[in-house]
Structures are given as structure tokens and as C-alpha cells.
Image (tube, rainbow, N blue to C red):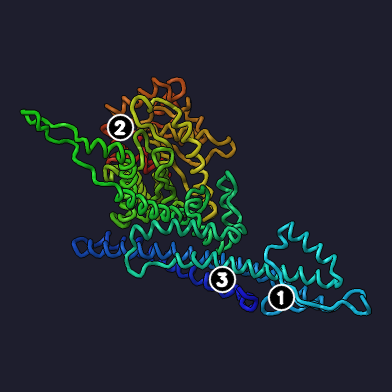
Amino acid sequence: MDLATLKAFKPTEFEDAADGYRTTGEMATAAKDTIDSQICGAIRGRLKGDAADAALRALRELSKNFHYTQSECGLVSTALNGFAFDMAAAKRKLQAALEDARANGCTVDANGAVTYPAGGEEQDGKIPAGGTVTGAAGSSASPTAAALDRQAAAMHPNPNYGKASQYADRVADALGEAANADAKWAPKLRALKADDDLVVSNADWADTKSDSDGVLRAADAYLDRIASPPKDGTPEQNAEWWNSLTPEQRADYLAVHPGVLGALNGLPADIRDEGNRMVLAQTRATYQMELNGIPPEPAKRQDNHNDARGSMTISPEWKEWQRKYGKDHARLENAMNGMEQIQNRFDRTGEKGLPEAYLLGFDPTGLGDGKVIIANGNPDLADHVAVYVPGTHAGIESIGDGGDCGELGKAERLWSESSAMSPGQDVSTITWLDYNAPDSVPTEATQGKYADEGGPRLYDFLQGNRAAQENAVGIAAHNTAVGHSYGSTVVGVAAQSGSWKDSKVVDDFVFAGSPGVQANRAADLGVGADHVWAMGGPWDDQVVRQGGRVVGLGDIGTIPTDSWFGGNVMESDSGGHGGFWDEDSQSLRNQAAVITGKYQRVELD
């Protein structure tokens, strides 16, 4: 890059362009949200038929386009800011070198060469003449080159030579930095150009991850100016960090670190949702492309032509396919199934009044079972919030299995019943799967180690949930933790994870079909025994609860449905271990009464 170009460079023009892209991204976000939560929600809630289904399909594709636009505009904005930052730094170095040269009687030509005046002591009756020197980029950073320059300056009869050499090197350094910035950013910005079509393909979404990585590496100097989240910060510290950032810094950080923001307890729900949805879209596209790259599975069995009885044998081709692709295929299929169920929840917004969903946590491989945290409604703005923790066998691949009676569906039924019970108030219910749930009964489900690991994670989430509420509206909502089966053991450990002075991250605990909560008394959970609620059922639920008593998931053989535990035992009409969320059931109504703080409506056993 030549001197005139760098002198004329205006960083503000690129910063203004970055602002324009950021604004465009915000408009795309608003359009996407309007389509998803308002337009599609209204269609699902009011219209049925082929025309409505066709409209929803078209709107989903349009929403995907806006989401992609949001992601790419964020990256372009960050890239332009990074380029402007690098060029501005080079320009400041150039201007400083030019000013110092001018102050000492030197001039700099269009090629960066520095002319110095005559000066020094007379030699042979003459003052040493002036001259012109050309700098070399990197000389000042090289100890060897710097030493040679000092030696040459010391030997030169004109003292202005040494100064001019330094100015020339500084000019060369500035021009070299500008040229490097241009060479670094030009391909990065070209790579952010979208395909010239209206289809956002899996390849397009997968490419946003490589785009993000490229911008992140290139913009390291610019992004280093943005403070990172506190290491192992509390939810309150995370919220304080987020509030300290400017809107521009928030947008830049979201563009290149969506997963980091999505996982930070204490941040606003809408920010975590944006970050996690970007990760979800990238992951779905990447996994689908990996699946597409695996050859079709051959038939497992083949005719045994040497057997007159026509028996079947295992196909050698199938055995080879299993050896080469079986594990990867199963892993990808399981994760894709879970991600489809998450998307299905997004696509059902508006059905039966179901509110907008917020993806508060997502990791397809987290802790073995995957991480999925989905809220029905914004928990930051709700009057009543319930966090539902599933038990044994829970995993990303089955998070929505069973339709509206699956793990996601249970939280949705809690939302519907609680909302009906509290007209005029906002309710948010959350499905929380962020622990390695036991996969087998009785081998794993009888061990407390899964709750010991998951409980503190749940406590941090509950603490962050409360911090986000207080940050949003100045006061915490009425918060309830609901644990089913082994999930209740996780909740019990979470209740005892904080110090006594800050342990009240929820107001009520509800335990359904609990095998024990690692506590001997309801009062040990920190909210008062009168705010601890439990219920049980017959048949397999008795097996689970009594089995937990035997193996010690409750201290000294105590479980929450024991009268001597000291909490409230609610009436239940569940027919077994999984029926506590049956529609129009007393079990469901009792949970909703606790969630909404209408304790007088709870039917006790």
C-alpha cells in the first residue's frame, strides 16, 4: 500500500459501513422474530388446512433466510470493524512518523523515502550534506537490523541521517502493516459474500462456522479490546460483564462467540437464545452433511443359498458398513433426532396458545447425553417460572419423544395449566437437561454420582435465572424447581449446593415420583418445609420410590413422600411413574397451583 492511500484512508467510513450491516442484521432479527412468534404463531392458532400448512412452510424458509442474514451481517460488521481497527492503527503510526519527521526538518516523499537536511560539524570547511534514505519494514523490530542502523548512524557525519533512517523505517512499518491488513482482510470479506440464490442450504449454514472462525482469527487485535467474560464467573458477574459492553461490542461478541454467550448463566434469555440458535443451525447443517456423506446402510440379512431351508445370514456388506460407519451414523442420527425435536418446538409456537420458545442451552455432545434447555415464554419477564428436570433415560435424542407427553411436552403442559390458573400473569416453564442422566435401571439409576455432578450445574442455572430476572425487571419471579424421578435427586443436590446465605434460588420445590433427594428433612432444602411438595403414584412409581429408599438416594432411607420428611404430600391421581402430567389431572393441577403460588388450591394427601 502506498503512502498517499494510507494517508487518505478514513476508518470511519468502514466503521459506518459496519454499523449499517449491524443495523441490517438487527432488522433481519426483528423480521425473523416477527415471522416466528407473531405471523406463524397466529396462523397455527387460528387456521387449519393445506393452505395454512403451505404458508407455514414458506414462512419457515423465509425465517431461515432472515436468520442466515442476521448471522452473516454480524460477521461482516465485525470484519469491517476489525479491518478499520487494523488500518487505523497503521495510519496512526504513519501520521506520528510524518509529524516527527516534519518537526526535525525532514520531508517524506510519495514513496515513503525521507530527505534530511545538511547538518553536523564542518569537514574540510563544509557542513555535511543532506540526503535521502529509504526505510525497511520490520527493521525496528529486528535487534540485528536496529544494531546495524545505530552503527551506521554513529559513523555518519550528518546527525540528521540517523533520525531520518528511523523515520523512514517507521513509515515503512506503517505501510507494511496497512498492506498486511489489506491482504488479510480482503479474502475474509470476499468469503462472507453469500451465494446468489434464495436458498439457504446446509452448506451455507455450515460455512458460517468457518466464516466465524476466520473472522475471529483475523480480528484478534480488535476483539482483544472487548473484555472477555469473567473466568468461572458467577451469574451476577456474568450479568455485570454483559452490562458493561456497548451495543457494538455485544453485537461483535455475539457474531464470533455465539456458543459462549448461549452458555453463560445470568445473561438475558433473548441473548442466550440468539447465541444457541446460531449454534443449533450450524450444527444441524454440519451433522446433516456428515450424514449425507455416509453410504446407505446395506441390508442386514441375505439369503443363504447353500441352505435348502432358505435361512437368512448376516450380510458381510452390513458387517463392514457397521464397522466403518455404524458408530458415527448412530451418533449423528441421535443428535439430529434431538435437534429436529427442538426445531419442532419452535415450529409449534402459537398452537394452543403456546408462547415463543427460548433456547437457553444447547450442546449436542455435552456430558454424553447432550445439553438442551428450552423455555416456554421469556423467564426474565415472567411472574412465575418453573424449571422441570427429567430423570433416568433423558437425553437429546429423546427430549421430545412421546409428543406432548415427552420431556418437552411435560413443561408445556405445566405452562398451559399454570397460565390458565393465573390469568393476567406471565408464566414461563423450562425443560432443563444439562446433566448426564442415568441410562439404565437399576445399575446407574441407583447411584448418586449423576446427581452429585448435575446438582451444582442446576444450582448455577437457577442462580443465573434469578439474576437475569432481577436485572431485567428489578425483582425476581416466583421460581419453582420440579424434579421427576432421578431428576428430583438432582434438584435435591442443587438445593444444597449454595451457601446458606444465598441458597434460596427458588421459592418452592416439587418432587414427583422421587427416589430420594439426598436429604433427610424438607427443612434441609433451604426454602422452609412448607414450600417443599411431593407426590407419588402406584405400580412402577412405587418401585422407583421404594428402590431409591433402599439404595440410599435419600438420606437414611427417607424419601419426600414420607410424612416424617416434613414436607407437603400432594394428592396424585397418576396411574404410574409417568402420569403426573396427564391432562386434566389433579397431579397436574397441584403442580400448577404451587408454580403460581396458589397454595390454597393444592389438594393434600
Q: Which mark is residue 113?
A: 1
Q: Position of residue 549 (x, y in %)?
A: 39, 22
Between 496 and 561, which is closer to the camera in this rendering?
A: 496
**Which residue corresponds to mark 3?**
15
Q: Secondary structure at mark 3?
A: helix
Q: Position of residue 44 (x, y in %)?
A: 27, 59
Q: Which mark is residue 577?
A: 2
Between 189 and 389, which is closer to the camera in this rendering?
A: 189
Question: Does label 3 or label 2 sit earlier along the sequence?
Answer: 3
Q: Of all residues shown, which one is farthest toward the right?
A: 125
Between 195 and 54, which is closer to the camera in this rendering?
A: 195
Residue at the image point whose x is 36% and y is 33% from the top: 392
Question: Does label 2 or label 1 sit earlier along the sequence?
Answer: 1
| Any part of residue 155 in sight | yes
Q: What's the distance in space between the residues labelled 2 and 1, CA to CA?
A: 84 Å
Which residue type does callout 2 highlight?
His
Question: Does label 1 or label 3 sit earlier along the sequence?
Answer: 3
Q: What's the distance in space between the residues labelled 3 and 2, CA to CA?
A: 59 Å
